[in-house]
Image (spheres, rainbow, N blue to C red):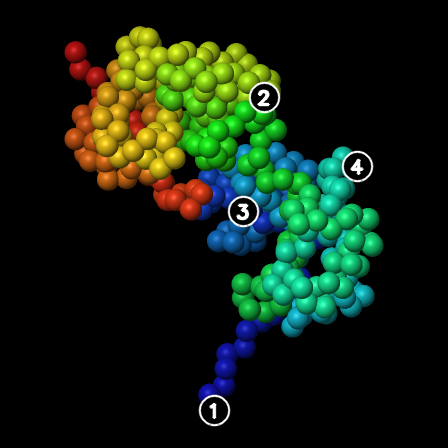
Amino acid sequence: MKKQPHTPPIPERSPNAYQLDPLEGLEALALSELRTRFPKGLRIVDADRLEFVLDGDASQLTRLKLSQIVYSIQHYAIPRPKALLGDAHWRRLIAQVESVIKLSPPGTFKTFTLAAAGTESSVMQRIRTELAARIGLAEAEKGDLWIRLLASASGQGWDSLVRLTPRPLATRYWRVCNYEAALNATAAHAMARLTQPSEDDVYVNLGCGSGTLLIERAAAGRFKHLIGIDHNPQLLACSRKNIEASGLKPITLIRAELQRTPLAVSSVSAITADLPFGQNVGSHEENQALYPPILREAARIARTGARFVVITHEIRLMEQLLRESVDWTVEEELRITLRGLHPRIYVLVRTNQTS
């Protein structure tokens, strides 16, 4: 019989081990943000799995903008979850959970959820019961403290993951007004970053909706002017409420058609737009009529070298228009996964303008 190669066991992780969970397609941006925010004390353990060790203030991880969730993660070299009830493993699990609870003000976590395969088994029921008794939180279907038990990706042992915050990081505190087609805040922050923010920016969000792209740009750094344009007065009112809740001012809101803005020629250094996908908002036929004049209007108001970052699910239409365009060159294209769809983020650069 052929001898099987020896696979070394996975070592136990540092108590300061964590894992990012960004939107699919934004992994590189999430890692870049992590490295920028933590120039010291950070060690990337597995870039593909977005695992790292942080020797520093872990509470700062809850301020990341480009990850949906950040988990504390531990590995257990055990064959089955039942072994977690053993003294040494149990103490490690409780220490992990308690360290996460301590990152937030007292009373932040009131309930917990244990998510695992075989959740109704006698072993999982016992783990849940003993967890509740030890950490003093009530079990709930959608608890504040989210704990996951997963078989390790390597097939060796089990991992425990504990979400650092009561809600996903993409759930922003300022969102007091919402609507069905509102852009995910993590995707919006990525788009704001892709404009290469500058303190001299005159930044325009075409079709500002509930204000997500405006607020995320304001959070990304200093600027000269932020301007949101939408033709719908109800959406402008929604934007205004969220902007006020964010405390990030001043931001100017203008009611106008996206194809005919009141802005001057070559007056803008950065533009973003969440164009209708033709799903919840708009239709393919309407988008065929809408997209070309928006691209032309963005080109009219953009300075040479200005970036226009667009997200859309109308891939074929957008690529056809960009192939035909003399105003824009494609600098970067990112495919992401968002609510079960696979839209793309295009980073466009305004070409040299001739008289």
**Earlier residue among tags 4 and 1:** 1
Please state which amino acid type lies under the numbered disc 1.
Met
Residue 65 lies, in percent from the top left, at 54, 34
| Badge 1 element | loop
- Determine the residue positioned at 55% across, 69% down: 155
Residue 26 vs 293, above or below: the answer is below
Question: For residue 246, which numbered disc appears in the image?
Answer: 2
Residue 109 lies, in percent from the top left, at 74, 41
**Earlier residue among tags 1 and 3:** 1
**Earlier residue among tags 1 and 2:** 1
The residue that mark 3 highlights is 21
| Badge 3 element | strand
Residue 273 lies, in percent from the top left, at 37, 26
Question: For residue 106, which numbered disc appears in the image?
Answer: 4
Residue 231 lies, in percent from the top left, at 37, 16
Marks 3 and 4, Cα distance to the nearest angstrom?
A: 25 Å
